């Protein structure tokens, strides 16, 4: 299993809330960036690489472990946690880039989807092969 490089996110002031710490909504943006960079790192971006393989986020969650603030750099590690017949789960760990302290933990359930037929579909073999390479089991 290869390791995907962490994604570093610089926290901007506009991503904080009235309490002065990163808004809960901002974490979902950070996790989306990490998912996008995951697919970029494994070479699964653009129609020429993906073909007609599409997917949607069916569910996402984030647990907040510690506060983060504007000016901080967060590191987000991504791994494939589960692969099903039509879906897969990406897990994310958000830490302070400098100290390694845990900030948040999140995941996204992603479903392969045919937009023309408006229905789910099996994880295609090409994508399955990529996901299996990065699967980390507990």
Image (cartoon, rainbow, N blue to C red):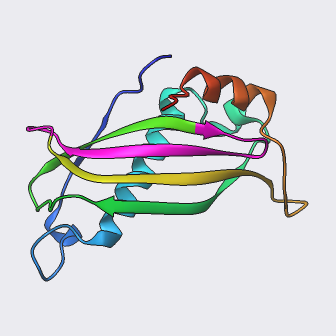
Q: Nearer the viewer, residue 86 or 20?
A: 86
Q: Is residue 31 left or right of residue 115?
A: left
Work out which residue is located at the far front of the displayed protein and give it. Answer: 138
Q: Is residue 137 left or right of residue 70?
A: right
Q: Nearer the viewer, residue 116 or 95?
A: 95
Q: Is residue 121 above or below residue 138?
A: below
Residue found 73% across the figure and 48% down from its top = 54
Horizontal and vertical percent position of residue 94: 28, 47
Residue found 9% across the figure and 37% down from its top = 98
Horizontal and vertical percent position of residue 87: 70, 47
Work out which residue is located at the far right of the displayed protein and give it. Answer: 117
Q: Is residue 71 left or right of residue 32?
A: left
Residue found 60% across the figure and 36% down from its top = 45
Magenta stretch encompasses residue 93: yes
Question: Quadrant location of residue 132?
Answer: top right
Work out which residue is located at the far bottom of the displayed protein and give it. Answer: 18
Horizontal and vertical percent position of residue 35: 48, 45
All told, the count of numbered labels is: 0
Q: Is residue 16 above or below residue 107?
A: below
Work out which residue is located at the far top of the displayed protein and give it. Answer: 1
Q: Is residue 4 above or below residue 52?
A: above
The secondary structure that most of the magenta stretch takes on is strand
Residue found 41% across the figure and 22% down from its top = 3
Magenta stretch encompasses residue 95: yes
Q: Point out the stretch of residues depicted in magenta.
A: 82-100
């Amino acid at each position: 299993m290869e390791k995907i490089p962490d994604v570093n996110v610089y926290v901007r002031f506009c991503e904080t809330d009235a309490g002065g710490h990163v808004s809960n909504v901002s974490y979902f943006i950070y996790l989306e960036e990490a998912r996008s960079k995951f697919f970029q790192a494994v070479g699964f971006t653009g129609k020429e690489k993906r073909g007609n393989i599409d997917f949607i986020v069916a569910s996402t969650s984030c647990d907040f472990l510690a506060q983060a603030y504007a000016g901080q750099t967060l590191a987000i590690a991504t791994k494939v946690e589960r692969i099903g017949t039509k879906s897969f789960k990406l897990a994310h760990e958000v830490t302070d880039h400098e100290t390694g302290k845990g900030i948040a933990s999140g995941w996204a359930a992603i479903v392969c989807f045919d937009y023309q037929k408006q229905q789910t579909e099996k994880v295609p073999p090409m994508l399955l092969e990529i996901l299996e390479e990065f699967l980390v089991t507990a």
